[in-house]
Image: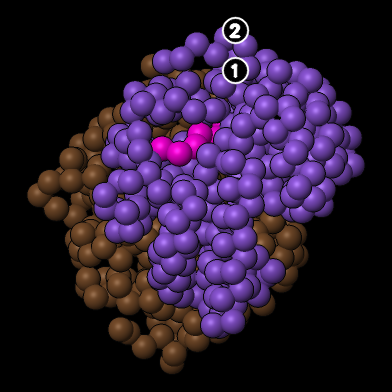
Chain colours: A brown, B purple
Amino acid sequence: MRDFSQDPRWLSINTATVRKSRGVDLPLPQIIEACAQRGIRAISPWRDQVAAAGLDTISKLVKAHGLELSGYCRGGMFPAADAKGLATARDDNRRAVDEACELNAKCLVLVVGGLPGALAGKAAHKDIALSRSQVRDGIAELLDYSRTVRMPLAIEPLHPMYAADRACINTMEQALDVCDELDRERTGALGVAVDVYHVWWDVKLQAQIERAGQNRLLAFHVCDWLTPTTDLLNDRGMMGDGVIDIPRIRGWMETQGFAGYSEVEIFSAANWWQREHGEVLDTCIQRHRTVV
Amino acid sequence: MRDFSQDPRWLSINTATVRKSRGVDLPLPQIIEACAQRGIRAISPWRDQVAAAGLDTISKLVKAHGLELSGYCRGGMFPAADAKGLATARDDNRRAVDEACELNAKCLVLVVGGLPGALAGKAAHKDIALSRSQVRDGIAELLDYSRTVRMPLAIEPLHPMYAADRACINTMEQALDVCDELDRERTGALGVAVDVYHVWWDVKLQAQIERAGQNRLLAFHVCDWLTPTTDLLNDRGMMGDGVIDIPRIRGWMETQGFAGYSEVEIFSAANWWQREHGEVLDTCIQRHRTVV
């Protein structure tokens, strides 16, 4: 297993982690500067943050600092209540692929979506099998496009507590079943993003990481599971503050040959987003070196 | 599939659903009276509620009203940080079996426990595999006892969001693997409690219900998954208010021959526990007839 203790060489910051500084929105250019100042070599930005600053601006800034993108957040949200909605999602996902290419991201992360309307509290139906079918079709169609521009798609299985409103792919096994169906040849065009927060609980995790193998292990995200967890979305913990045995899971990844970044992705409305972003980044570096 | 539309014949009330009336603790004898008055034929009480009223009192009251117990809540919480803790859990679980026998329950429901100390916010370790091993051993030992008094044990797979603090058995597949190991002969001494809240998201649910078969389908619990869900524990919805396709899941159960009660178990601190319990029970009956 790689030694992370000396420096943040393999640390990436998902920019949602410092989306706010002392509770105030922090523009992406400032996030990038703060990361670069600390010797952080990689980030994974969100589309809304990129759009707010302008794709060109971010592209230049990333290149100027020699930053890599461990991933780009995010495509997906495939299911819709009607044909128009499906087409809108398709077009938007193609744009996400293009942006990921412009930024030279390692992969486009897919949060695949759940029941249409559920995120707004008004699910159009209760047929999660239908949503899963639309997700499969949506990934298949996007893959036809992403292959032509050589942008790998990383399905992120989300924790089952997000099955209704954010992603109806909820385990590694389920994600890999889709990979098997759509990219049987293991070309590397389709794989998974392994976020410990979403999958740590799964008794089959080690076996499924082995099943995935190096070709399909496209990203590794870390944070921690707090006890208690007070909010389903925005109460993720800093690595080391919760119950996830992160080094064990990283070991399983690296045994398969994963040699990419360890990307910190923390949504924390009441704690980390209320602190000064410099403090948060310094803490990420320190925890990366000691407990990841 | 059975017709529930005419009466509450197959409705059972898990007494946690009316644990409070207008925010005030409601004693179990009053819950029993209110259920009996409405023609409800079955309940599933919690041990703390039984203990508060006295086992003898509840036993007599249940018999006087001709009520059945669709289950008894609950045994489990097997993992511990030391041998003393494991022994305490073992002894307490035997008492739970004895109480279930005294009340003539269909089964003792097992919420198996997670990382020791996590429920109090101080996990003793992060080794969920160790907890799972202790759970397996604890069930095996309890089964030796429960077989002698003919009390079936129903492992309840809990939603993965409870893996750390309440139950490290989180899918039907995982629960049935334990059943296969400890009761290969499918004697009926060990099975599962299927709570739609915990398992609705699982892409393998139908297949695992089929795998379980009639002998191992010991209980069926219903409520609903709300979008948004504002609390990990106490924001369960009334059937029909959320996104779970309950009739579809009940259909899968009944195709396997399940012919038991549909037990309503709703933890709802901000909504249903704030209402008058009579209104809650009437709503349960109405929803049982229309959306279960």
Taking A229 as reference, is A160 left or right? left
Q: Position of residue A68 (x, y in %)?
A: 38, 67
Read off the magenta span.
B217-224
Mark in the foreground, 1 or 2:
1
Picture quadrant where residue B165 is located: bottom right
Dot 1 crowding, Cα within 10 Å, few <14, some 14–19, many 20+: some
- Is A72 in front, or is B188? B188
Q: Position of residue A154 (x, y in %)?
A: 32, 51
| CB within 8 Å, label 1 to label 2 | yes
- Is B239 in front, or is B217? B217
Q: Pointer 1: what residue? A: B9
The amino acid sitting under disc 1 is Arg
Q: Quadrant of the N terminus of chain B?
A: top left
Q: Which mark is residue A226?
A: none
Q: Pointer 2: what residue? A: B6
Q: Position of residue A167 (x, y in %)?
A: 45, 41
Dot 2 crowding, Cα within 10 Å, few <14, some 14–19, many 20+: few
Q: Position of residue B125 (x, y in %)?
A: 53, 78
Picture quadrant where residue A88 is located: top left
- Residue at image location 74% in from the left, 49% down from the top: B55
- Residue at image location 35% in from the left, 33% down from the top: B214
- Is A183 in front, or is A17? A183
Picture quadrant where residue A199 is located: bottom left
Q: Quadrant of the C terminus of chain B?
A: top right
